[in-house]
Image (tube, helix red, strand yellow):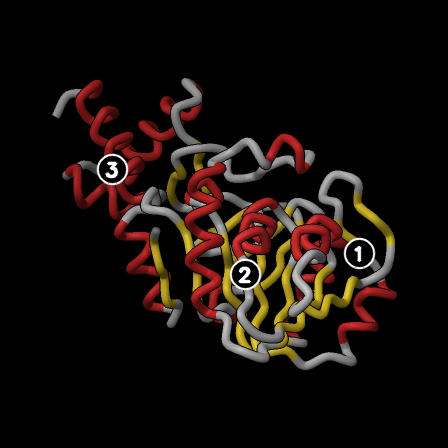
Amino acid sequence: MKLPERHRKILEILKSNGNIAVNELSEMLKVSSVTIRKDLGILEDQQLLFRSHGGALPLEPYIANRHIQEKIKVFPEEKKRIGAKATELLIPGDAIIIGSGTTVQAFAQCINPKSSLTVVTSAMNVATALVHHPQIEIFQLGGFVRHTSNSVVGNYAESILTNFSCSKLFLGVDGIDLRYGFSTTNAMEAQINRAMLKAAQETIILADSSKFGRRGFGKICDLGSVSQIITDTGVSHKTIQELEKHGILVTTV
């Protein structure tokens, strides 16, 4: 296999798998691991992939913090479908926690309860989306307000969460990485998310496919801490299989 053809094949494999190890590429393309590492170096210099420890990713995994008004324009239809699907998990009399982010905001906008529902949230836009429903009792957490996310963070909000026990946590994230786990761009946001995990019996991640293979600065938890992910059909089959190996139910809409 000539060099251009091998490089084209590497990029095709990355597109299909989301990430790949050097030894796997070596076996698939019938060349040495030294050759593969050289290939990855050339492709990274051309900004066609990002090298990770022992392998490669199709793009730079670390993401920068963006304002909510910018994020809300990304995959809006997918977020609506994800939010609508998540409402099917609600049961009468449920007490749930909703984190921050544009996908969980879409979830809140889809909620139309036929009976009582209690919602604890750190996100002011989530509370605003739900406040017109008389059946919903809303507990808005207090603390320092992050302007980029319209949500609160800090020790005060975290301490309040220790007084609650909820059935489910619906959480938005900035990154889902098979090795690193779930993350967000802000360390304080990650910290309050970890407090939410402790206050809920199960955690459901709501995230569009652009979040996969990405990492934020603040790690929230490992893969094993989450029971379910609801996402769109842009996630590769291999990534879904890997998540299912960790006991995560993945639903695509």
Describe residue 173's horizontal placement relative to residue 158 as left or right.
left
Give the residue displayed 75% in from the left and 45% down from the top.
150
The mark total stands at: 3
Describe residue 79's horizontal placement relative to residue 98 as left or right.
left
The residue labelled by disc 1 is 153
Front tag of 1 and 2:
2
Real-space CA distance between mark 2 and mark 3, rounded to the nearest whole angstrom: 42 Å
Residue type at numbered disc 3: Ile
In terms of depth relative to the viewer, which is nearer, 76 or 157? Answer: 76
Closer to the N terminus: mark 2 or mark 3?
3
Front tag of 3 and 1:
1
* SS under mark 3: helix
In terms of depth relative to the viewer, which is nearer, 82 or 197? Answer: 82
Q: From the viewer's perspective, is residue 32 above or below residue 243?
A: above
**Picture coordinates of residue 64, whole percent (x, y):** 64, 35
Front tag of 2 and 3:
2
Query: Which quarter of the rendered picture does the N terminus lie within?
Result: top left
